[in-house]
Image: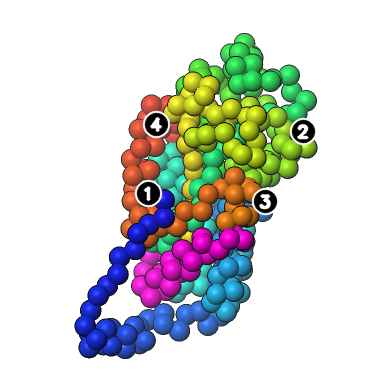
Amino acid sequence: MLPRRGLLRASGGIAAWAGAARAQAPGSEWPSRPVRIVVPYAPGGANDILARLYGQKLSERLGQPFVIENRAGGQAIIGSEYVARAPADGYTLLLGATGTMIFNPVTYERLPYDPVQDFVPVSIAASFPLVLAVSGEAPFRTVQDLVSHAKAHPDRMTYGTSSAGFQMATELFNLRAGTKFIYVAYRGSAESVNAAASREVTMTLVDVGPAAGALQAGRLRGLATTAQERLPAFPDIPTMKELGYPDLSLVLWSGLMAPSGTPEPILRRLNEEILRANQAPDLRERLRALSMDPVGSSTEEARRAVTQGIAFWRGIVNEAQLRFER
């Protein structure tokens, strides 16, 4: 749901004074040079696609290039730490995802960045469901087929994923289905899609966008999605909720984050432009073709999404007894 934005009403004199103050505020000349959006994942995944779509819109509106820089590895920790340590001047931003901001903090005992203290959320940009998929050549036609085989052969079943968010969702599936799929790490969604399609791993639970081409070509077979309702692009794939896994009726989100201390005028301008971009018909069409939904939020709404998400998933992590070390 798009946020309702309040309007500040003031007298003419106060408004004129505030306008003059803003004109002299730190960051009022921003941007005067190219801006980097760091994507802590490999090219080809949902976050990379989102960064490029929004980067193009921001470039058009703000008159400076928004350059996408992929710094993949370490469950998105490498790129996230890099931005957390960057100057808070609005020229280095993070395409932060649920995995970066929520799942890493609740699964790692030691993390070189704090999602609440080291970042200020600009806006949640988009949300998206996941699809559980196996190779098009695999014998599994349904989730029940997959679960039955996994219980009969617990030491042979693997899953590939590229982020803590997808890993957590799959471990929740393990928990609810009573299976023991073994985790195999990849640098990006495109890599985990190819690994599942080639039967390098048994299955993947991945964002729909990067898997869409392989699903349509028959290289992958979708067994279920985590969406609330069946996806228009893949109406034959049932939802996890339909199959008796209501806990797996979930969507992940991605948004723009800045290092803490970034001047307020920069944050405000970025937020305004993200909200404006979300209303652009061409961007909305591109997102929905990838089974993503444009969101848009205030800074405070994005901050609440982080803190509430950490609280919820910490309970799931404790139930599944998951801990990861770097």
Q: Residue at x 49, y 43 (%)?
A: 252
Circle nearer the N terminus (3, 4): 3
Q: Percent position (x, y) of residue 198?
A: 77, 33
Q: Over which residues does the magenta segment extend?
A: 258-283
Using the image as rendered, state which of residue 223 and residue 159 is in the foreground.
223
Q: Are marks 2 and 4 in contact (CB under 8 Å)?
A: no
Name the amino acid type tagged 1. Answer: Ala
Q: Would you name the residue on which mark 3 appears? A: 44
Q: Residues within 10 Å of mark 2 (few under 14, many from 20)?
A: some
**75 drawn magenta:** no
Circle nearer the N terminus (2, 3): 3
Tag count: 4
- Local secondary structure at mark 4: helix
Circle nearer the N terminus (1, 3): 3
Name the amino acid type tagged 4. Answer: Ile
Q: Would you name the residue on which mark 4 appears? A: 316
